Image (cartoon, helix red, strand yellow):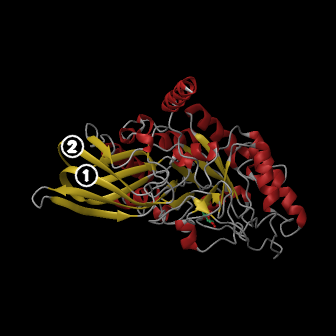
Amino acid sequence: MKHLSIIFFVVTVGVFCFSCRQPVAPPAPYGPVPTADQLKWQQLEYYMFVHFGPNTFTDLEWGDGKEDPRVFNPAGLDCRQWVETAKKAGMKGIIITAKHHDGFCLWPSKYSAHTVRESAWKDGHGDVLKELSEACSEAGLKLGVYLSPWDRNHPAYGTPEYNRIFASMLTEVLSGYGDVFEQWFDGANGEGENGKKQTYDWPLFNRTVYESQPHAVIFSDVGPGCRWIGNENGHAGETCWSRLDTTGFEPGKAPAADTLSTGNILGVAWIPGEADVSIRPGWFYSSATNDKVKPLKQLLDIYYASVGRNSNLLLNVPPDRTGRIHPNDSARLMELRATLDAVFATNLLRGAKVAASAVRGNAPAFKAAHVLDSDFDTYWATDDSVTAATLEFDFPQEQTFNLLLLQEYVPLGQRVASFNVECWDDAAASWKLLATATTVGYKRILRLPTTTTGKLRINILHALACPTLNTVGLYKE
Ligand code: FUL
């Protein structure tokens, strides 16, 4: 008997010690999560849209496809200047209108008779995609392409044959110019030159993209890679889920605009938002808009309403008739960059003490301090049963700020549904509410009233599953 209890004791102690050494398991993914390509795409945050083509020379927004291709003649085309401008602006890539609704191809497509080959530019020997892809790869910028399925020029548009032709055009572009990070699909579906509309074969188009570019993120109203944000003002919803329900929808037959802006809280697919907006009133260049480039204040509002609301920002900067970005646009881009660089240069939380109301398994692997290291892959988390929790920051000395930046560790899904921010009010000896908000996602930036305080508290009021935050930043605009 004595022998047995000794064995029992040894086994119990052994099991106990073994379990002590077990690391605390990370939270299981919650709901749909980004693919590796979608995560890399989200981390790009900000890139350039380029609308360029015959419309640049005709002052039109939608050419009807009957334009003489010889109007296209950007005699001083300088894709390196676009790339340099984008790079200095802090943009990570360029998405170009390889084919807009007028059907004109910026590359000499075998499948069209309305291309750079028929233009006056370089006597028909030019290729804008070649020049841009080379300039991008020299400078380490990503290349994306917009190809409109709506084609107001192509004689086959409106027949089943056109879908195969469009797929062949996609293959030409996507296999001939190196890596493409994003395929941009417009859902527009108007009449062609013969008055007929096309029934688009979206499964064929998407399949074709992945055949040549398996890592590309496909944009459309409803993804599958990323979604339109529902407006052309560059504003995501204040609530913005990266999740969307797409059953019964397709590009051009999209969910309501406000659904696209906010996503679906329990949406079954991971389809994060992309906010597209032009720096000028139109998408294409016109000398009439040279003095209508958006002011810095408006661009900052756009930045905080897109990147600051869990959405990527695709800012259109249309080159002029010489084929260069106009100085008014580039000057504004540089002002924006300089302002953002100055604002985000120093995290005012650096040096603060941080404490959490709960830490997953009380394990250092999930401690609150991970929100202040600069490592994307380390995060603060709570136990699975804890879906409301507080992070408190104690500053070595008072700080003055008006921007709060939060990031969720989205590889495990989007979780936070509501939170608020409070500061310590010394005079009243109590906490004072600064703001209440809903989603966080990959990145959330909240503008706050300018506040001076020694202590700050972020209360996660409701998360769909235990919160996982990897970054908190505090800044002064
Ligand atoms: C829209 C198009 O109709 C506009 O011309 C522009 O290209 C915009 C980005 O997408 O649907």
Residue drawn 80% across and 47% down? Answer: 171
Amino acid type at circle 1 is: Leu
Picture coordinates of residue 245 (x, y %)? 65, 66
N-term mark: 2 or 1: 2
The residue furthest bottom is 195
Q: Closest to the observer: 430 or 349?
A: 430
Looking at the rendering, the quadrant in which ligand 1 lies is bottom right
Seen in the image, is 218 located left or right of residue 399?
Answer: right
Q: Determine which of the numbered discs, if any, sits on residue 456 in the image.
A: 1
Residue drawn 38% across and 42% down? Answer: 371
Pointer 2 with pointer 1, Cβ within 8 A? yes
Q: Secondary structure at mark 1?
A: strand
Picture coordinates of residue 87 (x, y %)? 49, 40
Q: Quadrant of the N terminus?
A: top right
* Above-or-below relation of 367 to 63: above
Residue identified by numbered label 2: 395
Quadrant of the rendered image containing residue 80: top right
Residue drawn 52% across and 33% down? Answer: 19
Q: Determine which of the numbered discs, if any, sits on residue 398 in the image.
A: none
Amino acid type at circle 2 is: Phe
